[in-house]
Image: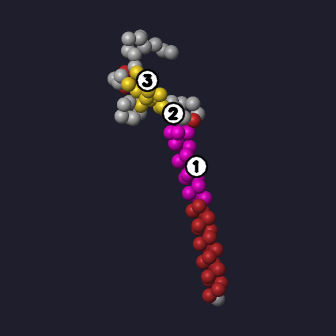
Amino acid sequence: RLETRIRTIERRAKRITTGQAERLSRLEQAARAHDPERTLERGYALVEDEAGRPLTSAAAARRHERLAVRFADDAVAVRTDEDKPSGGG
């Protein structure tokens, strides 16, 4: 009778462990899907100010003379040039 209870507990523990491992795997996949690096790998770029803070608008970028444009493989230092008229393209 004790052996039966031990086997039952072991089966339940294995089922719980397996379920938790599967849940963890799904959470890891979800986290990876929202990783900014993955977005960069798809061809997008991230514009940052001198302190490395992301800039989300052209107006914010215009307030800085120096910026960094980060791609998946590396970043490029850039300078703004406000002498040029801003256009739609």
Between residue 60 and residue 9, name the one nearer to us: 60
- Tell which circle, 1 or 2, labels the residue nearer the N-terminal end: 1
Q: CA distance from mark 3 to mark 1?
A: 34 Å
Question: Residue at the spot x=65%, y=86% of the render?
Answer: 3
Colouring used for the render: secondary structure
- Magenta stretch encompasses residue 23: yes
Spot occupied by residue 37 in the image (x, y as percentages of width and height): 52, 39
Of discs 1 and 2, which sits in the foreground? Answer: 2
Question: Residue at the spot x=36%, y=31% of the render?
Answer: 50
Query: Which quarter of the figure has residue 42?
Result: top right
Of discs 3 and 1, which sits in the foreground? Answer: 3
Q: Neighbour class for label 3 at 10 Å: few (<14), some, many (≥20)?
A: few
Please state which amino acid type lies under the numbered disc 1: Gln
Labels 1 & 2 near each other (Cβ < 8 A): no
Q: Is residue 56 visible?
A: no
- Tell which circle, 3 or 1, labels the residue nearer the N-terminal end: 1
Labels 3 & 1 near each other (Cβ < 8 A): no
- Residue 42 sits above or below residue 19 on the image: above
The residue singled out by tag 3 in the image is 78
Between residue 89 and residue 81, name the one nearer to us: 81
Please state which amino acid type lies under the numbered disc 2: Asp
Please state which amino acid type lies under the numbered disc 3: Val
The residue singled out by tag 2 in the image is 74
- Residue 1 sits above or below residue 66 on the image: below
Magenta span = 22-39
At numbered mark 1, what does the secondary structure look like: helix, strand or loop? Answer: helix
Q: Residue furthest left?
A: 63
Spot occupied by residue 73 in the image (x, y as percentages of width and height): 54, 34
Left or right side of 47 for 38: right
The residue singled out by tag 1 in the image is 29
Q: CA distance from mark 3 to mark 2?
A: 13 Å
Left or right side of 81 for 27: right
